[in-house]
Image: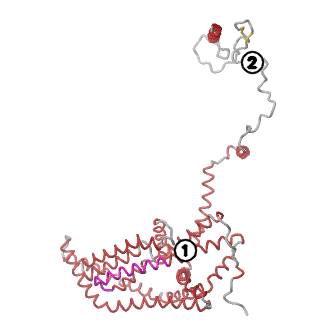
């Protein structure tokens, strides 16, 4: 204990003595208080000082006697430290060969790389839209025939499996489709002609009731309402020439509509007869390494389109039956034409059935009065709720998995580009692009699909 205490006392004395000595590396003391920025004279400090035992002790901060010089290394001193990652050396080499004045921030470089790609894709899409607009009379029959082929192709395939000739199977299914559409149109037209006389009288009575309701409910007199109606009639008379010219131009398009109908039927026939051969010819134009993946993406998109068209027809039929039955029970005229309108409107998701139901409510209002109109509105809302929460999830859920926002934006884009026809084909195009594009992005996650054989495509016409 005494020896340890003596050792501690000696160490304390040594520390006190070292602290009392001046620092040899500090600035020398001066008489004035000016700040010293540069001092050229070397301070006079003792090179060594004796310790408590009389031995010469090196100055504070000096290396120990016999220590190796740190400036003389036994090995190489340049390059990355041992154990450093290889990416560090690559970065050093890349930045070493670049002038400091020419360096570009990485964020700006990435933005530039993406910008020219986005500009190129946008230019290609713009050119595609321009081509579609220029050849609109050709693309419309082509797309309509493609949708109808998705609806009728399973029936044609079933007939072919029963050893029917391809041409006969395609012709039979084409005639079935034409007869169904013609039958619906004939039934609707006959119903309109039958109910037209009674409808005109009911409409006039309904308009009178609406005028009385407006004058009793709102602060407007009958004279002011008559003036407003007269202004509307005068506006129609003033624009009679424009309306007449529009009707004439519409009549002038009958020829183009008839030509488009013939082109649609002809295209539909060949899609039902030689659809796979036509696609194999298209695949044969692509690079050999990409044929299998493109063919598989097209197969998946086609199955999605078939399921989508089937489910849409089923949902539209349920909407038409529900609203048509409600109109018949309530005694609303033109119940069958309005049900057909609901059936057609159901092919436009979200807004089509709503607009068709609104027309039905207006007809009930002007023909049967406010109470019937409210009951019709309740029936339309009930059917729409059943469609949104029961029919569509059960029938469309497996066919289309698209967010409603994507559907709304697609519909808006379709209306801007192609009007009503653009709204009809917007959702099928989005669904097919979603399925096909998702597969192409993840094409390497699974096994390679079977190779298509374009050489097996049967030519539609052979040279003798």
Other residues around mark 1 within 10 Å, as few (<14) / some (14–19) / many (≥20): many
Q: Is residue 407 above or below residue 27?
A: below
Asked if residue 22 lies left or right of residue 214, the reply is right
Q: Residue at x 78, y 24 (%)?
A: 69
First reached walking from the N terminus: tag 1 or tag 2 = 2
Location of residue 56 in the rendering, given as x and y in whole percent from the top left corner: 74, 9
Q: Is residue 90 above or below residue 193?
A: above
The label shown at residue 304 is 1
Judged by its main secondary structure, the magenta piece is helix
Q: Residue at x 61, y 86 (%)?
A: 161
Q: Is residue 97 magenta?
A: no
Callouts 1 and 2 close, C-beta under 8 Å: no
Location of residue 28 in the rendering, given as x and y in whole percent from the top left corner: 65, 13
Asked if residue 63 lies left or right of residue 4, the reply is right
Write down the region rendered in magenta: 310-334
Q: Nearer the viewer, residue 306 or 419?
A: 306
Q: Circle 2 — which element?
A: loop
- The residue pinned by badge 2 equals 64
Location of residue 418 in the rendering, given as x and y in whole percent from the top left corner: 49, 76
Q: Circle 1 — which element?
A: helix
Looking at the image, the residue that sits furthest to the right is 74
Location of residue 441 in the rendering, given as x and y in whole percent from the top left corner: 62, 64
Q: How far is disc 1 from disc 2 in space, using C-alphas?
A: 83 Å
The label shown at residue 22 is none
Q: Nearer the viewer, residue 264 or 319?
A: 319
Q: Nearer the viewer, residue 200 or 51?
A: 51
């Amino acid at each position: 204990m005494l020896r340890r205490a003596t050792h501690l006392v000696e160490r304390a004395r040594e520390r006190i003595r070292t602290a009392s000595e001046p620092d040899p590396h500090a600035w020398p003391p001066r008489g004035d208080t000016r700040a010293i920025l540069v001092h050229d004279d070397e301070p006079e400090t003792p090179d060594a000082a004796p310790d408590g035992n009389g031995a010469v002790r090196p100055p504070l901060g000096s290396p120990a006697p016999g220590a190796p010089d740190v400036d003389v290394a036994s090995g190489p001193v340049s390059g990355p430290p041992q154990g450093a990652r290889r990416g560090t050396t690559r970065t050093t080499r890349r930045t070493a060969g670049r002038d400091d004045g020419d360096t570009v921030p990485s964020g700006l470089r990435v933005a530039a790389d993406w910008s020219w790609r986005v500009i190129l894709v946008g230019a290609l899409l713009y050119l595609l839209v321009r081509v579609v607009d220029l050849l609109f009379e050709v693309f419309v029959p082509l797309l309509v025939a493609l949708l109808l082929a998705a609806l009728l192709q399973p029936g044609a395939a079933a007939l072919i499996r029963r050893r029917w000739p391809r041409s006969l199977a395609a012709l039979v299914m084409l005639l079935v489709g034409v007869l169904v559409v013609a039958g619906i149109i004939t039934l609707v037209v006959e119903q309109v002609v039958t109910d037209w006389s009674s409808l005109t009288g009911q409409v006039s009575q309904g308009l009178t009731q609406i005028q009385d309701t407006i004058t009793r409910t709102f602060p407007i007199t009958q004279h002011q309402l008559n003036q407003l109606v007269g202004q509307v009639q005068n506006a129609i008379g003033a624009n009679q020439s424009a309306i007449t010219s529009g009707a004439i131009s519409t009549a002038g398009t009958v020829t183009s509509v008839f030509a488009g109908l013939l082109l649609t039927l002809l295209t539909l026939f060949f899609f039902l007869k030689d659809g796979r051969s036509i696609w194999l010819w298209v695949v044969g134009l692509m690079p050999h390494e990409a044929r299998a993946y493109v063919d598989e993406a097209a197969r998946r998109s086609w199955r999605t389109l078939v399921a989508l068209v089937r489910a849409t027809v089923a949902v539209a039929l349920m909407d038409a039956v529900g609203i048509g039955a409600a109109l018949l029970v309530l005694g609303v005229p033109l119940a069958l034409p309005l049900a057909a309108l609901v059936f057609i409107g159901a092919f436009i998701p979200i807004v089509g059935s709503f607009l068709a139901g609104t027309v039905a409510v207006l007809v009930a209002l002007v023909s049967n009065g406010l109470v019937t109109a409210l009951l019709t509105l309740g029936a339309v809302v009930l059917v729409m709720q059943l469609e949104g929460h029961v029919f569509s999830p059960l029938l469309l859920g497996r066919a289309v998995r698209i967010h409603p926002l994507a559907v709304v934006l697609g519909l808006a884009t379709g209306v801007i580009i192609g009007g009503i026809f653009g709204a009809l084909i917007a959702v099928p195009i989005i669904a097919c692009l979603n399925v096909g594009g998702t597969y192409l992005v993840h094409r390497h996650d699974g096994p390679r699909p079977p190779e298509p054989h374009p050489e097996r495509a049967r030519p539609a016409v052979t040279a003798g």
